[in-house]
Image (tube, rainbow, N blue to C red):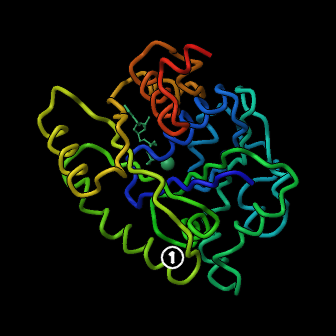
Amino acid sequence: MGKVIALANQKGGVGKTTTAINLSSALATRGCSVLVIDLDSQGNATTGFGISNNGSANSYDLLAGKAALDGCRVETSIANLELVPSCIDLVGAEVELAEQDDRHTRLRSAISQSNVSFDYVFIDCPPALGFLTLNALCAADAVLVPLQCEFFALEGLSHLLKTLARVRRSLNPSLEIEGVLLTMHDSRNNLSEMIVQDARSHLGKKVYKTLIPRNVRISEASSHGKPILLYDRTCSGNLAYESLAREMLGVSEEEEAAK
Ligand SMILES: Nc1ncnc2c1ncn2[C@@H]1O[C@H](COP(=O)(O)OP(=O)(O)O)[C@@H](O)[C@H]1O
Ligand SMILES: [Mg+2]
């Protein structure tokens, strides 16, 4: 398998799901093969791709050992991009997993048993640091942390960083921080700028150069079940996720245009 990246932050509403949908789409349209695993019982990544839960195998079945990864993957409206949908049953998975000896490694095993290798696997985590997120952190090579540009943005981060350190000590020694992504940035707002400076001074190079602006088209797209690039290619939100994809791939806009 290529690189497995967990999108994690125990805070809700910071842009985990939005980033899972739109970064994966931007990478897939650049030729990468990508899988998104929706690990949140709310299923926002699933509906954000316009996929409805029709009783097919899903991420709950995967964790419960009732289905293999290759039996859960479904196609999305973007070529090269597949999804393991979520299911409301995930609500109970926290409790059910707590009783199992391999409660932290279920997802890791499931991913390692896939017959198909994706360039990128993104795991969209729920807004909590329970067993579901721990499964994601255990399965991942790296974690991408979206931070909303608002007051208290950095407050929860120390808790998350402690959890990452704990996971490294006990479950997954090679877990890295892929990057910290500042989301819902508003250049007209001084507070947004303060958060950017604060994050850069505390976290240095880990913070992506790309800032994701607050852009209503992004949430409109999700409510229409579409990645932003299929909804409005020219809006600032899409341009930002395209820029993030290039940053991740290490190519400039000029290099890409020259191809
Ligand atoms: N850059 C953005 N601009 C405007 N709205 C956004 C942006 N990113 C996310 N949203 C909206 O904010 C809400 C929370 O985002 P979401 O990605 O679901 O967060 P999380 O998965 O961390 O809970 C959603 O309604 C989403 O559409
Ligand atoms: Mg979410």
- Name the residue rendered at 38%, 45% in the picture: 181
- Give the position of the N terminus as an image quadrant: bottom right
Where residue 155 sits: x, y (%)? 24, 62
Residue on which the image places disc 1: 168
Count of numbered circles on the image:
1
Q: Quadrant of residue 53?
A: top right
Above or below for 33 versus 13: above
Above or below for 249 versus 168: above
Lateral position of residue 63 relative to residue 40, left or right = right
- Near-viewer residue (72 or 207): 207
Where residue 160 sits: x, y (%)? 38, 67
Lateral position of residue 64 relative to residue 24, left or right = right
Q: Quadrant of residue 188?
A: top left
Q: Amino acid at mark 1?
A: Arg
Callout 1: few (<14), some (14-19), or many (20+) C-alpha neighbours within 10 Å? some
- Give the position of the C terminus as an image quadrant: top right
